[in-house]
Image: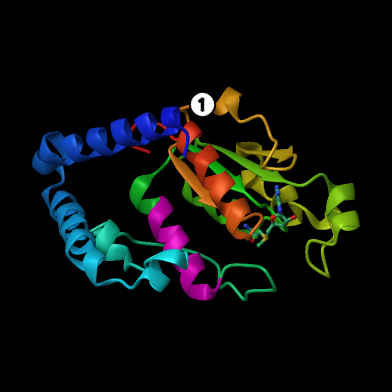
Amino acid sequence: MSFVNKVRATLRVGGTTMSYLTYKAMTRPQEARAFFRDVADAVTEFPTRSRKQLRTPTLPSVSLDRICPDISSVQLTIRPHIPRAHELTEAEYLSMAALIAYYRPRAIFEIGTNRGRTTRLMAEGAPASAKVYTLDLPPERMNESGCFPEANGALIGEAFRDAPCHTKITQLYGDSRTFDFRPFAGTMDFIFIDGDHSYEGVKSDTAHAFEIISRGG
Ligand SMILES: C[S@@+](CC[C@H](N)C(=O)[O-])C[C@H]1O[C@@H](n2cnc3c(N)ncnc32)[C@H](O)[C@@H]1O
């Protein structure tokens, strides 16, 4: 991590912690409690992790109500989702719908459109004025690179093309590693990373996500 990124990360961690100690502690006390419980768990569990575990990149799995304590109060109406290859599982799809209903983001960025079924889910669940940006490889590159055997550039975004919510959606094309995210800096309330699933790809997409996330996003 470069020095500048270290400073950025430190400021972000400090800012987040301060927000949970101050206004979020008053406005969303359950969320603040969950945040500090997670921090405490991470600190106490850290020494017990083996060197091997630390070398092996794994993400902790947390339940939705750990992130959003009152999420069970959210009411959802969604179509049944029968997942195809490379799509969200039913549980992930339901969780995504719940997160969108809970946070009501006005600006969403998705990395990895594929057919666009999750793009559509997010667009349908977001407020009427919301904008959804979704990025995929240029169709000809998706076909050529064969990033997965049945990849087909013609199918990118097919799930929302004819849906009423398509007016909220902007399809973007490019490789997320080299895409110019600067025009979106600090503007996105909700980001879904689901493109290049290699470690380096996810790392790069995550770094870009931190550049475009809005305050409180
Ligand atoms: C798992 S699929 C996305 C599924 C979609 N988010 C959904 O929920 O239905 C991954 C997509 O990421 C795209 N992709 C892979 N590498 C990419 C990259 N470097 N930049 C942009 N998109 C990429 C692929 O073309 C593919 O369409």
Note whether residue 72 is visible.
Answer: no
| Quadrant the C terminus occupies | top left
**Nearer-the-camera pick, 197 or 42:** 42
Residue 66 drawn in magenta: no
Taking the spot 83% from the left edge, 69% from the top edge, the residue there is: 150
Figure colour scheme: rainbow
Residue 140, image x, y percentages: 90, 48
Compared with residue 105, is residue 98 higher up or lower down, i.e. above or below? Answer: below
Q: Which one is in front, 202 or 67?
A: 202
Q: Residues within 10 Å of mark 1 (few under 14, many from 20)?
A: some
Label 1 sits on what residue type? Ala
Report the side of 161 relative to 21 (left or right): right
Element type where label 1 sits in the image? loop
Name the residue beneath numbered marker 1.
185
Relative to 14, residue 103 above or below: below
In the image, residue 126 above or below residue 195:
above
Looking at the picture, how far across and down is residue 104, in whole percent? 39, 44
Q: Residue at x 58, y 25 (%)?
A: 182
Quadrant of the rendered image containing residue 105: top left
Location of residue 211 in the rendering, given as x and y in whole percent from the top left corner? 49, 32
Q: Is residue 181 left or right of residue 161?
A: left
- The quarter of the picture showing ligand 1: bottom right
Residue placed most toward the observer, 87 or 17: 17
At which x and y percent is residue 138? 82, 44
Residue ID at (19%, 64%): 41
Q: How many marks?
A: 1
Res. 81 visible in picture: yes
